[in-house]
Amino acid sequence: MKTSFVFSGSGGQGIMSAGITLAQTAMRMGKHATYLPEYGPEQRGGSAKCTVVISDDPIVSPLPRRCDNLIVMNNLAYNKFEEDLKPDGLLLCNASLVSEPRQRDNITVISAAVDDLAEELGNAKAANIVLLGILIGATGIVSEEAFLQSLEDKFKAKTPGILQLNVAALKKGISIGKPYRA
Amino acid sequence: MSEKRFMKGNEAIAEAAVRAGCRFFAGYPITPQNEIPEYLSWRLPEVGGAFVQGESEIASVNMVYGAAAMGTRAMTSSSGPGISLKAEGISYLASAMLPALIVNISRGGPGLGSIQPAQSDYLQATKALGHGGFHAMVFAPNSAQEAVDLVYEAWEYAERDRNPVMVLMDGCLGNIMEEVELPPMKKLTDEDLPEWSLTRRNGRDYQGNITPIYTEPILEGINTMAGEMYKAWEEEDVKAESFLVDDAEYVVVAYGIASRVAKEAIMALREEGFKVGMIRPITVFPYPKKLIHDLDYSRVKGIIDIEMTIPAQMREDIELQVAERCPVYEYGRSGGCLLDDEGVYDAIKAIVTGGAD
């Protein structure tokens, strides 16, 4: 089973970080993963996109044309990559910045105001982790336990509050995503 | 003891170089290879090595010349535009018979081109890395793991041949993170220093002279030796992968990132009953001529050259071996637009079903 994810938005929204953390967590669980970042020459504010492929078998091509899961953090990314989502795919939108996602084919659309939700938890910077939580809740692509371990590794050098914030963000996301689990 | 890590191709190359005994790097920043110098800037000092961000590409490659002359395992890395600037120094390395590793993480070209990945430096790497008619062995890995394995062995070839070695990999593979298994640290001592090196370490006296300029009869002799060395590479050092070639009616030839995308497409086409296979050069110089030459052309109906550059650059090397025994087709993306599995699948299918030429 091979599953592809495209995370997209603008520089500073934690797109690359979300992709790496998901791929590393999959690897932690004994799966195979590739992560490909793509960005423009801008230092910040430019477009940011990464492609993650997760599979039980070694990954042959890390360059799928279309993805099973599309995660968009703003309108620009939505308009640019919407057509790359496969029919039957999952579209996950940051409703704080994506105005009106179109329903098409048989795609599942989850729209959540992750910027606002993260802000309520204490810091809007954790929006990408809320989003990952939703993705994990809806797809079960990695386990909550394995992802918590990745968060601990990622934030172990920071103050404990930052880890707590991200754990809360993850759990919030999972609670939103779980009802969509097929 | 080996260890597994999730690393970018660029970082994997840097760590493999350190473990292969590299103790000197000089380079100048350019996308998409910046993770190599970034990584080595902290990693080399940890192992007693030296990292220099030179004032230019030309200065950097000449610092590598100096370090290599001292018997130190030395390297530089860049992308197309920077490799062009280093061309003079690479030619001097070959002339002075100095081992070194040159890494090209390639991007769109010509000129400053684009910062996005492309396989647009094949001809430069395999035909003329600089003036004077020399060659370097060119490794073209298609994964972070293969990059690690080839870099780990690079200086063994470079020191055996007293000649630079190039690793040619596109920016896509340089930036993809995937799982790699790292080999142990090679433990080199002063005893391992090449006997020709200009070192006074280990109680040695001054060894002589290393020069990139010669009088004419000596230079002719050096040119002749180089020619014999390139022939020997073809006999002994070609590395290539054959995938489902034995019954193939169409054979894809692809290296690096293109070979991975093509393999996925071939696997899908095989499920539909299309007899497609692939030859993947791992060394693009020396080129796996024999594999392509010796195909059974009573069965093979076409060769498909797939590269992430337009026009295809490997085509002439393929055509020389095919010798008009079947048609040669090409498909590619270029300028920083990436190949993808569906595009390659569609292109191969159109060719094998007779819908394209």
Image: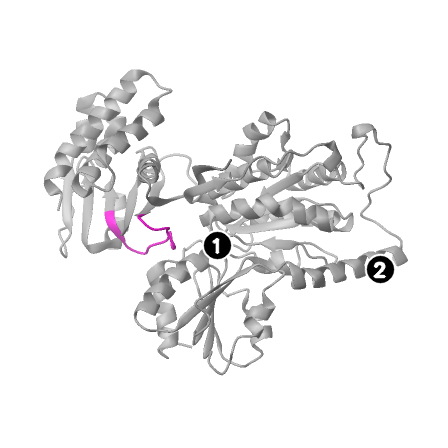
Check the image and name the residue furthest to the bottom.
Answer: B298
Instruction: Name the chain under label 2.
Output: B
Q: Quadrant of the C terminus of chain B?
A: bottom left
- Foreground residue, B357 or B196? B196
* Point 16% across, 29% down: residue: A172
Report which quarter residue B201 is drawn in.
Answer: top right
Q: Earlier in the sequence, mark 2 or mark 1?
A: 1
Check the image and name the residue furthest to the left.
Answer: A179
Q: Is residue B133 above or below residue A41?
A: below
* Point 38% across, 65% down: residue: B266
Determine which of the numbered discs, if any, sits on residue B256 in the image: none
Which amino acid type corresponds to the residue marked 2 in the rendered image? Glu
Instruction: Name the chain under label 1.
Output: B
Q: Position of residue A122 (x, y in %)?
A: 21, 20
Instruction: Report the residue marked by disc 1.
Output: B118
Residue B89 appears in view:
no
Q: Is residue B228 above or below residue B93?
A: below
Instruction: Report the residue marked by disc 2.
Output: B220
- Foreground residue, B157 or A117? B157
Report which quarter residue B193 is drawn in.
Answer: top right
Q: Residues within 10 Å of mark 1 (few under 14, many from 20)?
A: many
Q: Please check whether the numbered discs 2 and 1 fall on a single chain.
A: yes
**What span is colored magenta in the figure?**
A55-69
Going by the image, does B188 lie left or right of A144?
Answer: right
Q: Is residue B36 magenta?
A: no
Q: Position of residue A97 (x, y in %)?
A: 21, 37
Q: Secondary structure at mark 2?
A: helix
